[in-house]
Every structure is written in C-alpha cells, then in structure tokens.
Image: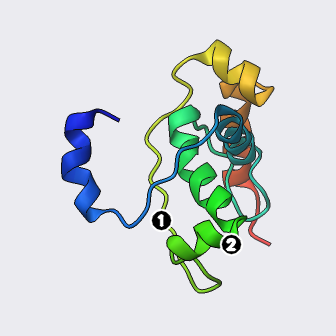
C-alpha cells in the first residue's frame, strides 16, 4: 500500500493484517473450487487476500479478538481482481482460468437442491 494512502485509511481501520503469499494462493484455490453453496470464483492474488485475511485471523484467538470476530460476525468481501496473469494463475491454482469459468457456468445451471 502506498504510504500516502495509509494516512487516510488508518483512522478508519480497527486492525490490519499482512499475509504471506502462500495464504493468498490457498485462498485462490479455495475460491476456484467453490462448493455446493458457493459458486467457483476466479480471483487473483490480491483479490483472494480478502478471504485469506479473515481466515487467518479466525484461526488465531488473539487476532480474532482484536478484529472483534466471533460466531455472530458477518464479513463482506469485495473482490475486483481476476486472473491478471493467466500463467501465474494456473501455476498457483493448478488449473486454468477458463476451467474455473466453465465450472462457474455449470454451477449456475445446476438445479437448486
């Protein structure tokens, strides 16, 4: 994050977390996989960090407390980045962006259980 931006953002933040790259890659794979309830999503490293951060914080009691996360918390994730580098995406996720998009389309067409 640019230092100049931080002086404006800091007053409105309760906490901040930095992430090692492997956690962002794990979140990319989790989003790409989807589930019966969650549509597969195409997310690059920066986009997936929005999931990796709260996931990391929920696994650590001290971080969870600082972030005020509990069983009643709701977290809104805003993701605006796709596979900006298709080769890197495939290397990190283990499949192409096109295959994730195909599964996304299949998920949308599946009957609701």
Which residue bears the numbered disc 1?
76
Residue 21: numbered disc: none
* Residue at (63, 70) in percent of width and height: 62
Helix, strand or loop at mark 2: helix
Which residue bears the numbered disc 2?
61
Which quadrant of the figure has residue 20?
top right
Are the residues at dot 1 and dot 2 in contact (C-beta closer than 8 Å)? Answer: no
* Residue at (66, 56) in percent of width and height: 56
Helix, strand or loop at mark 1: loop
Question: Camera-side residue: 80 or 58?
Answer: 58
Residue lying farthest to the top in this orientation? 87
Residue 75 higher or lower than 85, as above or below: below
Residue 29 higher or lower than 65, as above or below: above
The count of marks equals 2
Residue lying farthest to the front in this orientation? 62
Label 1 or label 2, whichever comes before in sequence order: 2
- In the drawing, does residue 86 fall left or right of residue 47? right
Residue 102: horizontal and vertical position, in percent?
Answer: 71, 35
Residue 47: horizontal and vertical position, in percent?
Answer: 51, 40
Give the colouring mode of the picture: rainbow
Question: Camera-side residue: 108 or 49?
Answer: 49
Q: Nearer the viewer, mark 1 or mark 2?
A: 2
- In the drawing, does residue 27 fall left or right of residue 8? right
- In the drawing, does residue 91 fall left or right of residue 9? right
* Residue at (80, 72) in percent of width and height: 113
Q: CA distance from mark 1 to mark 2?
A: 20 Å
Residue lying farthest to the bottom in this orientation? 72
Question: Camera-side residue: 58 or 44?
Answer: 58
């Amino acid at each position: 994050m640019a230092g100049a931006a931080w002086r404006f953002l800091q007053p409105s933040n309760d906490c901040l977390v930095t992430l090692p790259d492997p956690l962002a890659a794990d979140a990319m794979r989790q989003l790409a996989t989807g589930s019966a309830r969650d549509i597969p999503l195409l997310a690059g490293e920066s986009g997936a960090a929005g999931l990796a951060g709260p996931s990391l914080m929920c696994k650590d009691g001290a971080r969870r407390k600082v972030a005020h996360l509990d069983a009643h918390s709701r977290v809104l994730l805003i993701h605006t980045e796709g596979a900006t580098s298709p080769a890197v995406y495939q290397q990190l996720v283990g499949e192409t962006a096109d295959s994730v998009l195909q599964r996304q389309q299949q998920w949308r067409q599946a009957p609701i259980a």
